[in-house]
Image: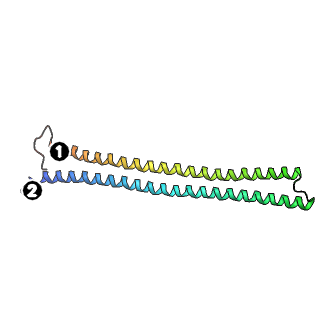
């Protein structure tokens, strides 16, 4: 076993350095995985935002169609009742129906856009979180490397002993 005496300090140094390197690589990989996960979630949220916009648009078109059907029914009833579809009361009622249906249509469009903006904000937040995790992993990796160097410095540069202990 005496022949291992000079080799043990070198092996100790190598394992300390290797441990620091492995820790640094692991930290960076964890940060990259966190960023990739955040990007995936952000893309899902953007897709959901586009779906919400589409739903809002479809609802808007449906409200307008319903308003047109109500207008048509009003004209049919007015024509059947008196034959005069240009009566002031009929025209006023038709205008009210048109305004109300347009208001409802624009409300549906707004609701879809508002939901979409919420998902887009969440996507931006996910991306920022992923970028922060990745940046943090770089700092953690640097800390791991510095910790390994510090450990080596403490071990081999003791002010009390000039030679490393072998026991």
Q: Residue furthest left?
A: 3
Q: Which of marks 2 and 1 precedes in the sequence?
A: 2
Q: Which mark is residue 155?
A: 1
Q: Which mark is residue 96?
A: none
Instruction: Confirm or deny contact between disc 1 and disc 2 (CB under 8 A).
Output: no
Q: Residues within 10 Å of mark 2 (few under 14, many from 20)?
A: few
Q: Residue 140's x, y, as percent?
A: 32, 47
Quadrant assignment for the N terminus: bottom left
Residue drawn at the location 84% of the way across and 58% of the way down: 74
Left or right of 87: which side holds 21?
left
Q: Residue 42's x, y, as percent?
A: 48, 54
Q: How many marks?
A: 2
Q: Secondary structure at mark 2?
A: helix
Q: Secondary structure at mark 1?
A: helix
Q: Residue 39's x, y, as percent?
A: 44, 55
Residue drawn at the location 13% of the way across and 47% of the way down: 165
Q: Residue furthest right?
A: 82
Q: Which mark is residue 4?
A: 2
């Amino acid at each position: 076993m005496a022949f291992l005496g000079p080799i043990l300090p070198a092996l100790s140094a190598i394992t300390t350095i290797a441990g620091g390197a492995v820790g640094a690589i692991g930290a960076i990989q964890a940060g990259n995985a966190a960023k990739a996960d955040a990007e995936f979630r952000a893309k899902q949220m953007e897709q959901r935002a586009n779906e919400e916009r589409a739903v809002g648009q479809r609802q808007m078109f449906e409200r307008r169609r319903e308003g047109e059907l109500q207008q048509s029914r009003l004209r049919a009833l007015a024509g059947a009742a008196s034959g005069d579809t240009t009566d002031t009361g009929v025209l006023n009622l038709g205008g009210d129906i048109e305004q109300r249906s347009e208001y409802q249509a624009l409300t549906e469009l707004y609701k879809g856009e508002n939901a979409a903006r919420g998902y887009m904000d969440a996507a931006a937040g996910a991306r920022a979180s992923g970028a922060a995790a990745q940046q943090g992993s770089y700092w953690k990796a640097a800390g791991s490397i510095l910790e390994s160097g510090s450990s080596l410095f403490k071990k081999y540069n003791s002010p009390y002993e000039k030679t490393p202990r072998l026991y």
